[in-house]
Image: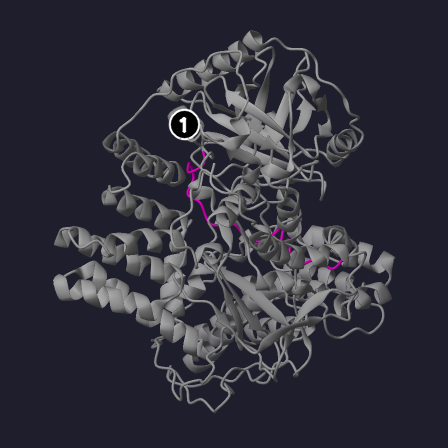
Amino acid sequence: MPPETSTFADFQHWQAILQAMEFQLDENDTPSEHSTASPPFLQPGVYPFDVARHPRLKPLSTQHLKDLKEKNVNAEPCAIPVFPRDACIQNLRRARKAAEEKESSPQRAIQGHYSEVGARTHFSSLLLSQLCRVGISDMQAHHVHKGQYLLCRIASGPVREEGVVCFAVEDPAGIVAITLKIHKYPGTTWASTAALDVLFPLGTLLAIREPMVDLSTTPVPQGNVSVYSPADLVFVRPLDPILRDVKWEIPATPPVSRSAAEWKETGNLHFKDGQFYVAAIAYTKGLDVDPDAYILKLNRAAACLRLEYYSIAMVDAEAVLSIDEISDDMRLKARYRTAQAQYGLANYEGALHNFAQCLTVTPGNAEAKEWTERCRRRIHERETGEYDWGRMFRDAQIPGNAIDAEEFIGPIKVGESARGGGRGIFVSKDIKAGDLLLVSKPVVVSFPQELRGLDYELGANLITLETDSVCRQSLITKLVTKIVGDPGLQSDSATPPDLRQIKLPIDVGLIERVIAYNAFNLNDVTRPPCFACTKNLYRSSSALYLLPSLFNHSCSANSTWCNFGDVLVVRATRDVAEGDELTISYIPLEGSCANVSTTYLDRDDGLYQHMDKCDCPECEADRLDGKQACERRGVHLARLRETPEWTVKRAQGLVCDMDATYPGGRTRGRWASARARLVLAEAIVREAESDLERLKEAAREAMKALEENGIVVLDKSMELGSTEVSVETSEGGATLPIAIGDAPIWSDVGTCVGAMLRISSIFHGQGDLGMAKRWLDAACWCESSFPPSKPSKTYRTPLPVLAIQSMGYTLARAPGAG
């Protein structure tokens, strides 16, 4: 075992980050669990898992989750049932054989299970030398054996059962054996039995720090030792001092020796299979046999690049570069991987230097040229906050694509929030609507496309009393893996750490709480508005961000967020004065699905995890309208959703009914009424045909819908204009027919965009391409909240007719119209 060195500084580093995020939870003010944000668009058939055919994996009821939580809390310590050594080992061998048969089967059944989130977990922060040894027979179930460690030996081949790695272990007495269950261990997600053998070979000696024992739920309960922190699993070397005077009653199975070349081949096989952590372990074991095998270091660097262990990869690649007697090809490969590691660490200047060195050797290297250009783009983004949004949008259209972009922090700062305590994000200077505030990359992200359709894990969340999606559940293991190889913890390391001997204590319970309250479901900018309300356990992507998690909620938020792939972008939706707090909405208003929030009654239900009630202007205005009015409003909105097509007469009745639910003379923030007015505008257009006056009436209703949503309409003219598309622009974006400095307060973006597109369509049908272009520009601004910071003097882009048609609007071409 390596010398025991204190890892408390590293532990406190990550604990500080996680606890800073969890602090919001303690103050009932935790952002930002967007349970209804949009998932990536998926082609039919991408996900073979049919929930309807697997009733076991439907969302768990709240009562079921409450029962699980109660059972977890009330478990009392008791004796472990006696289970003979051979019987325990045979059970695990049978499970292992079944797993191997399943892996070799040409038709693999799709598996699925629930894992409890927020159940009792434990991790030890004590060194092994500070603990005393305990035997299996002396342990108790439902108990954490503090101040003790279990010395044991792996007695059966490892197998994955419902997301947990299991194998039998025996202690030196050899009388009984017990099942060891390892949760969230790096490299075990979707790992084959062959991959698990690399991590946990038969006969390996282990020391479990402060073991936690529970009982299985089988008809005959069995004791299980559960390990939640990877650092609690200590791999004991044969000459370790703790083995002094230890006598094993059962002889050990002779270990299988392998050469460095064999370990290299094993690592390559797992690398090709996408098991990069297992591959890194195999290369490490090969280096144990032959420390001079520098090719293994190069291969391990490649595996660590895939794992985003950039500092470890750089140490390995630079170690190879320091060797004098290597071929030019190997030196080029080492320099190339050094540059890639520097790029991953955001050291773009260093990466540029090393890619330039590669190009001096191979001037025609297209990949090195592309990497060089990427470095320059990242430096430009970091220094200016200017991004190629078009490229990012195109890249984001590929489902499951991680976007290559640099982070940017605008004029914002962290401060104490006056809304219920806790921290929030504030502006450090006056900002305008549309200003870029933040571009953030995730700490960890999970896309449905990563799932292999073999073993789906849903979360039975005892914290939120909800069922967590597959992607949200996978964030837990991903964050554990990220912390194990965190580049910040390895930046000063002279040699790469032994990934088998993880030293950093990890509090999985804290990680589960952080993800439960702070993970985002990705709000994909490339998807239509209806996706913003989809809540699908198998199709919604999830990610965890650091700074964005500190934004507090408001239904009438002054900033908005969306995702380009995994990159989260925040912009202001109206002018904000220096020192004011920035807010985002945790629950969307836009979209057409039934689970869109309607009034404060529904929003309170959606926000219960974060606050007792929302005190934003939108919710306070709803409360002044009264509970009965809000209930009637909800009924009318349900009618609106359930009726596919409206006549003008019925739509007018809907508008009157909706207006009656705003009894206090409320003029702005009437987004429900705005939806009814847009329905009326659409009905008028359908019945108007070519009647110009009726079309103008439809446009006026659409403009009223915008005003009821808090948007100030500057140009209400309905006269025919020029057919020229080029429009002169005054500084500040005055060409838009709406005011962008204070719009919209209550952001029902879907209705606003629909109203603007309808107005644009009407103008286009009349042949007024100038006004059509202005309203289309307004729709694009409102939909994305990405106006240009310095508008050009002339719009030279042709009128994008397809953009309007893609939203479901038909453009009637006027005679002679372009």
Q: Which residue is mark 1?
A: 192
Q: Residue at x 82, y 74 (%)?
A: 665
Q: Residue at x 38, y 25 (%)?
A: 194
Q: Secondary structure at mark 1?
A: loop
Going by the image, does 108 lie left or right of 645?
A: left
Does 144 appear above or below 504? above
Q: Does the rendering let one see residue 796?
A: yes
Going by the image, does 366 lie left or right of 737?
A: left
Q: Picture quarter containing residue 358? A: bottom left
Q: Residues within 10 Å of mark 1 (few under 14, many from 20)?
A: some
Q: Residue at x 25, y 65 (%)?
A: 354
Does 141 appear above or below 605? above
Provide residue 701's location: percent of width, then percent of height: 63, 72
Residue type, mark 1 in image: Ser
Provide residue 83's location: percent of width, then percent of height: 64, 10
**Residue segment shown in magenta:** 28-47
In front of the other: 536 or 698 = 536
Residue closest to the far bottom? 730
In front of the other: 7 or 305 = 7
Does 222 appear above or below 653? above
Provide residue 19's location: percent of width, then percent of height: 66, 55
Per the image, is 389 magenta? no
Q: Residue at x 61, y 58 (%)?
A: 17
In front of the other: 614 or 343 = 343
